[in-house]
Amino acid sequence: MSGRPHQPPGFPEKKTEQTPVPRLILFNKPFNVLTQFTDSEGRSTLKDYLPIPGVYPAGRLDRDSEGLVLLTNNGQIQHQVSSPLHKMDKTYWVQVEGLPNEQALEKLRKGIELKDGTTLPAKARIIEAPAIWPRTPPIRERKFIPDCWLELTIREGRNRQVRRMTAAVGHPTLRLIRYRIGDWTLDELKPGNWCEIEIPDALKVQLRKNSIPRNRSRANKLARKSFTKRYRK
């Protein structure tokens, strides 16, 4: 006895596929960089900054926005971060034109009526200008119109949502930086730089839980297929 499982004659031995070890990358996306690895028009992409094969962005960040992007080689992590079903908090630092009053901030907090529906309640407050890098090119400045910074936390990911929200209350966005996704932040990560971090324990547990039903489902499917072939004759 070799100890190996019995393989019926006529069936090639199936090789076990190795599941890649989940990876999680934090990247500080510069202005004018696309959140993708290829572009037919020759514009700057993630490929110019991330020499890491097999990872993909979990969610998007507009080309004219800056800040935190998460990348992973694991579909479950990607879904956990980007899917609206999980409603993961995302915090933005937003430089806007003008000085929003409390009424404008309250509208942002309660929800803004946009063309694609009302936004979910958000957190909004005025903050001091953050100690961040200068943008290249710099924002346009209007000599007689002041500007200020907001900290806005949302739980959705609609197309250009933050820009549309601030415009709806009369304060167009001049500069937009994503500072936080869930528990991950931009702290000490310079534009164009990336770092790989450990998968949090809570997320590891979730990945293990999700893999059990999937493995069972695959096994059941193979068993049904074998049963059908055997008794179809």
Image: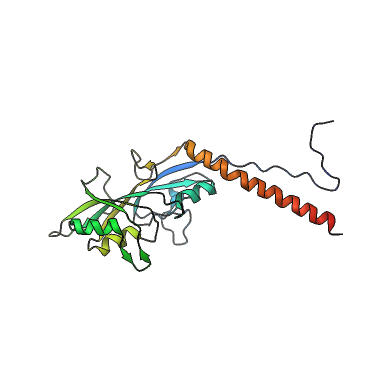
Q: Is residue 204 left or right of residue 68?
A: right
Q: Residue at x 36, y 49 (%)?
A: 90
Would you place residue 23 above or below residue 229 in this image?
above
- The percent position of residue 78, horizontal first and vertical second, equals 49, 49
Is residue 199 visible in the rendered structure shown here? no
Tell which of 53 and 199 is nearer to you.
Answer: 199
Give the number of marks: 0
Is residue 121 visible in the rendered structure shown here? yes
Query: Where the N terminus falls, by quadrant?
Result: top right
Residue extending farthest to the bottom is 115
Colour mapping used in the image: rainbow
Q: Is residue 170 left or right of residue 115?
A: left
Query: Where the C terminus falls, by quadrant?
Result: bottom right
- The percent position of residue 171, horizontal first and vertical second, equals 23, 61
Tell which of 155 and 71 is nearer to you.
Answer: 155
- The percent position of residue 21, horizontal first and vertical second, equals 56, 39
- The percent position of residue 166, horizontal first and vertical second, equals 27, 60
Q: Residue at x 71, y 50 (%)?
A: 220
Would you place residue 156 above or below residue 131 in this image?
below
Q: Residue at x 47, y 37 (%)?
A: 200
Q: Residue at x 23, y 56 (%)?
A: 105
Q: Is residue 119 left or right of residue 99?
A: right
